[in-house]
Amino acid sequence: MEYTQLGRTGLKVSRIVLGTMNFGPQTEEADSHSIMDAALDAGINFFDTANVYGWGENKGRTEEIIGSWFAKGGGRREKTVLATKVYGNMAAEGEPWPNTDKLSAVNIRRAVDASLKRLGTDHIDLYQFHHVDRSTPWDEIWQAIDVLVQQGKIIYAGSSNHAGWHIAQANETAARRGSYGLVSEQCLYNLAERRAEMEVIPAAQGYGAGIIPWSPLHGGLLGGALRKEREGGGSRSTSGRSADALKNPAVRDQIQRYEDLLAKHGIEPGEAALAWLLTRPGVTGPIVGPRTAEQLASAVRAAELKLNEEVLTELDEIFPGPGPSPEAFAW
């Protein structure tokens, strides 16, 4: 496993990030523990979660599963760079209540304590803002974060699903306060969805924040979706926006060209999509969310895959990026 520094920090993290969103909803606790053990064995030290994972009545369940894994000892917590998120509403289903979501100083304080309890640890390495809170000023957010850093409850702060100008606004406010600011941005980024290249990634690079792409296979679209469809596995090969995308003949043609290219070179589509992200400027590492040990093994193989210039050029032809702003939408 290769390692890199997270943004401008001195923290070393694996180029593959273990996403845990499936732990609980789709993967049982024992299997989740086995996947985390296998990830550490493969050299993956960067684990990502969120307080709302588990969803519905089971919000927080994923953090609890990670916590029970840490409790097994064996250096599991010490070897793991732990990232979680705050923003989602943690009120009980059907019992809405104010100040149980978003980024007020009150909710941040309550949310971090609740996450620490579920995770069974005394600190979070990377505490991320899961979405933009348009109602809370950055001065208030950084005041809350600075207190948590001073208390030793968190070490770094990052963002997720923020626009380029949000990243700039956040870090300019942090600089004015003498705060460290955002060290990472977790965004939707893959071969089929490259809009982050216009402003989000340049902003992150400009402020020394590492990019952590989520949905690197675009809901399965880039994981051999058409091949699996032909083989009878299409029901699990795509989901959400990607399943809808395949109804578009132009998208189907694009994905077919993609799969044909990789078949010619003997490369698995999902592994190519991950390997491509590892070539992109500013990318720390993509988040993979395995449901099984084999899916994790595939991600590890992707980290070792080196795409040659011919393949990279053809991938750009099939999935052209928008280019940087303002040229992407102006002269």
Image (cartoon, grey):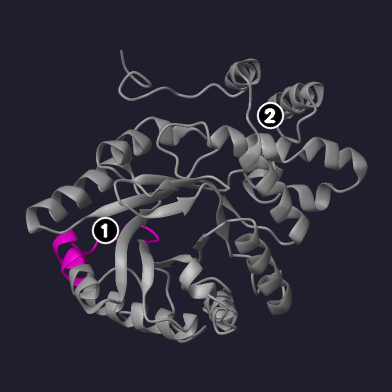
Residue that protrudes farthest toward the top in the picture: 331
Spot occupied by residue 71 in the image (x, y as percentages of width and height): 55, 84
The answer to whether residue 168 is left or right of residue 219 is left
Q: Say whether residue 4 is visible.
A: yes
Residue that protrudes farthest toward the right in the picture: 231
The mark found on residue 16 in the picture is none
Picture residue at 64% right of the left edge, 17% below the top: 314
The correct choice, above or below, for 318 with respect to 167 in the image is above
Segment tinted magenta in the rendering: 129-144
- Secondary element under disc 2, as helix, strand or loop, is helix
The mark found on residue 134 in the picture is 1
| Residue 139 is a magenta residue | yes
Name the amino acid, label 2.
Val
- Secondary element under disc 1, as helix, strand or loop, is loop
Spot occupied by residue 96 in the image (x, y as percentages of width and height): 42, 83
Picture residue at 52% right of the left edge, 79% below the top: 60
The answer to whether residue 32 is left or right of residue 125 is right
Q: Identify which residue, 163 or 281, lies in the foreground.
A: 281
Spot occupied by residue 35 in the image (x, y as percentages of width and height): 68, 66
The correct choice, above or below, for 144 with respect to 288 in the image is below
Q: Earlier in the sequence, mark 1 or mark 2?
A: 1
Q: Identify which residue, 61 or 297, lies in the foreground.
A: 297
Q: Quadrant of residue 126?
A: bottom left
Q: Quadrant of the C terminus?
A: top left
Q: Identify which residue, 286 or 308, lies in the foreground.
A: 308
The mark found on residue 251 in the picture is 2
Name the amino acid, label 1.
Arg
| Residue 132 is a magenta residue | yes
Q: Identify which residue, 175 or 151, lies in the foreground.
A: 151
Picture residue at 42% right of the left edge, 79% below the top: 115
Picture residue at 52% right of the left edge, 83% below the top: 93
Spot occupied by residue 217 in the image (x, y as percentages of width and height): 64, 43
